[in-house]
Each structure stands twice: as structure tokens, then as C-alpha cells.
Image (spheres, grey):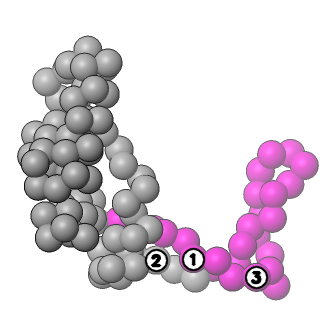
Amino acid sequence: DYAELTSLDGVNPHGTYLAELTREFHHRAGSPANWKRVIWDIAAPAILADPACAEMEIVPAPVFTDSFTYAFDKTRHSMILLKKLDRDAVFKGCFDALRRGR
């Protein structure tokens, strides 16, 4: 949320940049009190740094059909399905890394 993201202002150039972007996007959204921003870019590095923050399952890759649906075929190659992500753990890891200068 706004308070979390702007708390990074001044910790290092990356944190300051993220805080500046947050202020800009918050302003563009009309500055609502309950404003939040989804930052999907940090999910993959967070999972690599802390696999426990995610619940994953290896499943066969789906087949996309002509009717804009998908079907499953157990003979297809495998893929990782992300079933659940601990948002708080992801953000904590990101913020901790920014505060450490990484």
C-alpha cells in the first residue's frame, strides 16, 4: 500500500525511485485512502530467494483449444503451477533486500 511503498524513500536509489513512482501512481488514481499497487515483477525473484513463500505444483501443461478453452493431457510436458503466494513474505523479502542495498 501507499505507506509501505513510500517508506522506502531514501533507503537507496532503488527505494527512492519506487517511492516516487508510488506517489505518482497514487496521485493519478485520485489519491484514494485505501490505494494499493500490485507489483507482480517481484514474485519470481521472491520465490527463488524464498521458495517457502509460495505453494506450487508440477502439472502437465494445458492444451489451448479452438473454442478458447483449455484441456489437459497428461502426456504433455510439465510446468510449474503457482497455487498460492504469501504476499507479506514477498514484500518483506523485497523490502529487506532494498534496505540492505541489494
What amino acid does circle 3 point to? Answer: His
Residue that badge 2 annotates: 56
For the point 16% across and 56% down, which residue is it? 12
Measured Cα–Cα span from mark 3 to mark 1: 10 Å
Q: Which residue is mark 1?
A: 80
Q: Is residue 73 magenta?
A: yes
Q: Residue 20: x percent and y percent?
A: 23, 35
How many residues crowd around disc 3 within 10 Å: few (fewer than 14), some, or many (20 or more)? few
Could you say which disc has been placed on residue 77 in the image?
A: 3
Do the numbered discs 3 and 1 sit on residues whose CB atoms are within 8 Å?
no
From the viewer's side, name the closer residue of 34 and 39: 39
Q: Position of residue 58 (x, y in %)?
A: 58, 82
- Which element is circle 1 on? strand
Per the model, the C-alpha gap separating discs 1 and 2 is 6 Å
Answer left or right for 53 relative to 78.
left
Q: Which mark is residue 98?
A: none
Q: Quadrant of residue 88?
A: bottom left
Residue at 51% of width from left, 80% of height from top?
Answer: 57
Bounds of the magenta span?
Answer: 59-85
Q: Is residue 92 visible?
A: no
| Amino acid of disc 1 | Ile
Q: Is residue 38 in the magenta section?
A: no
Q: Earlier in the sequence, mark 3 or mark 2?
A: 2
Question: Badge 1: few (under 14), some or many (20 or more) residues near its Cα, within 10 Å?
Answer: few
As drawn, which residue projects farthest toward the top? 30
Number of marks present in the image shown: 3
52 to the left or right of 88: right
